[in-house]
Amino acid sequence: MAKTIFKKCHMCGHVIEAQVEPQRCEKCRKSFLPSNYFEKIHSKEKIEFNHLFSCSDDLLEEDLVKGFHVLW
């Protein structure tokens, strides 16, 4: 069974539940950056922005911002 990501929007406080990191808030449409963004953009591989967002099973607790994310 896949883990679920719970993410709280830092602009409006809306809580999003998903299997893949959300790219924007469902309520206020605020855009989000993917976890480990700076590591991913500085890698040697050229990856499209949309592919930087991880599935819940690929994330560890250390990858998440405490207070805004949780894996369940």
Image (spheres, rainbow, N blue to C red):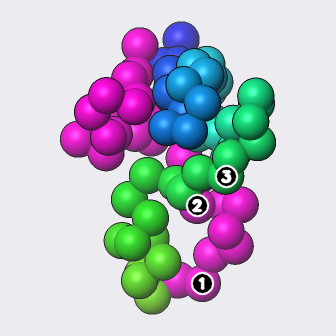
Label 1: few (<14), some (14–19) or many (≥20) C-alpha neighbours in 10 Å: few
Q: Is residue 34 above or below residue 44?
A: above
Q: Is residue 71 above or below residue 60?
A: above
Q: Estimate how packed mark 2 is, as few (under 14), some (14 to 19) or many (20 or more) residues with alpha carbons within 10 Å.
A: some
Q: Pinpoint residue 12: horizontal percent, then vertical percent.
A: 60, 30
- Where is residue 45? Give x, y as percent: 52, 83
Nearer-the-camera pick, 13 or 48? 13
> Residue flagged by tag 3: what amino acid is it?
Ser
Location of residue 40 with respect to 35 vertically, above or below: below
Q: CA distance from mark 2 to mark 3?
A: 14 Å
User: Would you say 49 lies left or right of 65 here?
Assistant: right
The residue wearing badge 2 is 52
Q: Which residue is mark 1?
A: 46
Residue 15 appears left or right of 31: left
Q: Please name whichever residue, 62 or 30, is drawn nearer the observer in this view of the structure.
A: 30
Q: Residue at x 74, y 36 (%)?
A: 28
Along the polypeptide, which appears first: circle 1 or circle 2?
A: 1
Question: Of the residues tagged 3 and 1, which is closer to the observer?
Answer: 3
- Which residues are the magenta region? 45-72
Q: Earlier in the sequence, mark 2 or mark 3?
A: 3
Give the mark nearest the N terminus, 3 or 1: 3
**Residue depicted at x 52% and y 54%:** 34
Q: Amino acid at mark 1?
A: Lys
- Quadrant (top left/top right/bottom left/bottom right) for the C terminus: top left
Callout 2 amino acid: Leu
48 or 65, which lies in front? 65
For this orientation, the residue located farthest to the left is: 62
Q: Which residue is mark 3?
A: 31
Residue 51 seen from this side:
yes
What distance separates the C-alpha of mark 1 from that of mark 2? 10 Å
Label 3 CA crowd tier, 10 Å (few <14, some 14–19, many 20+)? few
